[in-house]
Image (cartoon, rainbow, N blue to C red):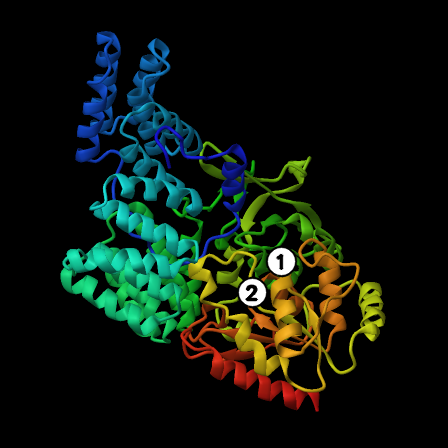
Amino acid sequence: MSRNLGSGISAAALATAQEAAGQGVLPGLRASQLGDSASADSIARLNREANTIQDPATIKLLNKAIIAVQRGEYALAEKTALKALKKNERAGPAWHVLAVAREKLGDFASSMHCYDAALKLLPDEAAVAGDLGRLAFRMEMPEIAAKLFMHSLNANPNSLEATNNLACALRDLNQESAAIDILKPAIQANPTQPVLWNTLGTVMCSLGEGRTAVTFFDEVLRLAPQFGKGLHNRAFARLDLGDVEGALADCDAGILVADSSEDLAAMSFARSTILLALGRVTEGWAAYSARLSTELGGVPNYQFPVKRWTPDQGFAGKRLLVVAEQGLGDEVMFANTLPDVAEALGPDGALSILVERRLVPLFERSFPQAQVAVHRTVSYQGHIYRDAPFIEDWSGIDCWVPMGSLLETLRPSVEAFPKRERFLTPDPDRVAHWKKVLEDAPPGPKVGLLWKSLKLNAERARLFSPFELWEPVLKTPGVSFINLQYGDCDEEIAYAREQLGVEIWTPPGIDLKQDLDDVAALSCALDLVIGFSNATINLAGACGAPIWMLTGAASWTRLGSDHSPWYPQCRCFIAPDYDDWRPIMADVADALADFAK
């Protein structure tokens, strides 16, 4: 990046990042971003910047604003920096102080624009680039963050902060090799820096190399036994290896030494899923409320003009609004409880349901007695909000509840999950339509395939096998493979055709990402659906389609069992770890050969 180029943050890029927010959060690794825009070093830097201003009145205002930042009085700092900018709108230091104040106030979107202005006006871009890079990373804009960290590192090649932060961004861009290349020489030169070992461990986790990651996290904790992020991350490496008890011990220890409210929220959320993975279901659901903490990135503030339902209120006679949450797959999976809710409300109660737009037709058919509407998620000043603009009359609703909060009451154990055939109802006419269309596919049992998720950052990518390892499954004789994979999958389909001689047939006239009601019908027209846990396989399972699901050793959604309580017809293939998917793919291939016979 050349001097005064700016960050390259466009309104479209910012909108994309904000759109991604509110799509659900996953318990995962804790990055070790270094630096703080309001640290002692940063305050000293802001003072040096202020001293470059020629106008005494502007300097006086800036000094007052910087003192306010130092004291944590960020609203006062914002107000005073704005006064300085009113005197001189091209005062780079004032933009920098305003950016810091708004970042600390949680107004991330506006803060980014202020940092961008400072970046263009200040002669020392590197420091501002580091601040802006950390904020971009926090807002899940790793590509922009990586460019800013690279700029900062080029200006200060020995900066551990820039080195570490760039490696974190590269990891999230699935550029693990580049991250390792940056970290290795830094660790060789600074072998006692636990943060660098921690970041390297997260890179190994993203590669699915859990054993190596544990070794690095062990070194982190040898150097810094109270390093909360190291304990948290080792817990996840142990989960990847199936050591759930060890993961819980690390998570509990990490919670005791968490050094920020954000880390504490993330670790508490992780702990709830570890309890569920252990089969401690009642405890797990009680702790699962941690997922709703707005300290977690992407968790919305719910905006409804009625009180929230709690289990002590019961269901009978209530006019209840159930709000879908997390990602699309969770909206479908958690709907497992809705038939029970509808029954428990009784003749004097009423059920309303808010779901993602694409699910409305399916839920309307499945729950004809309910009012089904679309929830809306928006971002404003760096915060996420979810509301219900299409509910015009709230007088018919007593209270609301996040869908996942019903599980503690209705699914307190694995045994409490009903063995019902389905809990969502596909369109029977469309099922018949797709059965007819599938007659044009190659002969043999019709087997739908799903091999990835639309959101595949480095951490999530480890949960999915490389497509090349599907070879023994795809070469199963006598099977007609049907593409159910949403998103861009042309490369994989071409690879199967050209390298393996296998045709994955794509049904005509359907958008596999948008037409979810039709996807549900298509899934039920197939003989079998095989894939990893993503939105579509949850949709197929909820509608009663036969599914084979590939899962990790400690997948929490199995609730400590060897099967899926959510979908009785589901067969689970459980990988011992994420390092080598070949054994599980061989098991699937053998089972599919038997199925095809």
Q: Quadrant of residue 444?
A: bottom right
Q: How many marks?
A: 2
Residue appearing at x 31%, y 36% in the figure: 131
Front residue of 342/556: it is 556
Question: How far across and how far down the image is residue 595, in percent?
Answer: 67, 87
Number of other residues with Cα within 10 Å of mark 2, as a class: few under 14, some 14 to 19, many 20 or more: many
Relative to 98, is 186 above or below? below
Q: Alpha carbon of mark 1 to alpha carbon of mark 2: how far?
A: 10 Å
Of the pair 453 and 124, the residue shown nearer to us:
124
Q: Is residue 321 above or below residue 131?
A: below
| Three-letter amino acid code at the position of disc 2 | Lys
In the visual, does 430 lie left or right of 421?
right
- Secondary structure at numbered mark 2: loop
Residue 174 % position (x, y) = 43, 58
> Which mark, residue 452?
2
Q: Residue at image x 26%, y 11%?
A: 58
Residue 563 position within the rendered picture, expressed as x and y whole percent measured from the top left? 53, 78
Q: Quadrant of residue 52?
A: top left
Residue neighbourhood size for the residue with mark 1, other residues' Cα within 10 Å, grouped as few (<14), some (14–19), many (≥20): few
* Residue drawn at 23 percent across, 13 percent down: 59
Name the residue tied to disc 1.
488
- Which quarter of the figure is the C terminus placed in? bottom right
Q: Tell me, yes or no, whether the two marked residues, 1 and 2, touch with CB atoms within 8 Å.
A: no
Q: Position of residue 368 (x, y in %)?
A: 75, 55
* Residue situated in front as seen by the camera: 301 or 107: 107
Looking at the image, residue 1 lies above or below residue 62:
below
The dot on residue 133 is none
Can residue 302 be seen in this snapshot? no
**Residue 137 against residue 476 in the figure, above or below:** above
Q: Amino acid at mark 1?
A: Asp
Q: Nearer the viewer, mark 1 or mark 2?
A: 1
